[in-house]
Amino acid sequence: MLARNEKTMQARFEVETIKQDVVPLLSGGPFAEFPNMAELFFRQRDGSVKKIDAKPGVSVMQLAIQENIRGIDAECGGACACATCHVYIDEAHIPLLPAPADDEAEMLDGVAAERRETSRLACQVIVSDALDGMVIEVPERQF
Ligand code: FES
């Protein structure tokens, strides 16, 4: 029994040691160039605009769900398999996004609302500092 407790204590010590090594890297080092937040604007179906401070690294779909933006259904949970997270990105920010991958482009062919040059799947758009100020418009329908 004592040996098991010693192993547990050793494991805890190792975890704490790793945390001490990793946490400073996340808050400084190579991650220091990322800002804390990007300001995004959702234009909703009723015409209202909701401003959201987003942490880089989350998808626009995750953010919409988390912030209760109506009209982004995300039936597949972000697996790029349903196209019910279709959104329109403002023209100024479209060139800042990576081009849609083949699977996203294929799903965009089947969106329910009008497909535009600025159409994207929100689950495939990852927030970064470069997207600060981006406007995301919710289309009139997803089905
Ligand atoms: S959530 Fe299903 S394609 Fe984006």
Image (cartoon, rainbow, N blue to C red):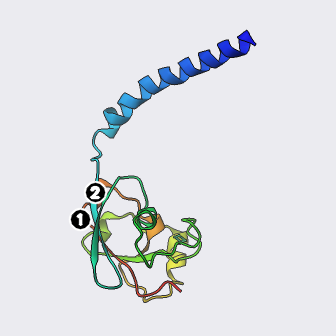
Q: Position of residue 60 (x, y in %)?
A: 41, 65
For label 2, the SS is strand
- Please name the amino acid that badge 1 sits on: Gly
For label 1, the SS is loop
User: Residue 68: which quarter of the image?
Assistant: bottom left
Q: Quadrant of the N terminus?
A: top right
Q: Position of residue 46 (x, y in %)?
A: 33, 85
Front-lying residue, 97 or 135? 135
User: Residue 135: which quarter of the image?
Assistant: bottom left
User: Residue 96: which quarter of the image?
Assistant: bottom left
Q: Position of residue 103 (x, y in %)?
A: 55, 70
| Spatial CA span between label 1 and label 2 | 7 Å
Q: Position of residue 14 (x, y in %)?
A: 55, 20
- Where 140 falls versus 105 (above or below)? below
Front-lying residue, 76 or 8? 8
Locate residue 117 relative to residue 85 in the image: left or right: left
Q: Residue at x 39, y 65 (%)?
A: 67
Residue picked out by circle 1? 133
Mark found first going from the N terminus, 1 or 2: 2
Residue picked out by circle 2? 38
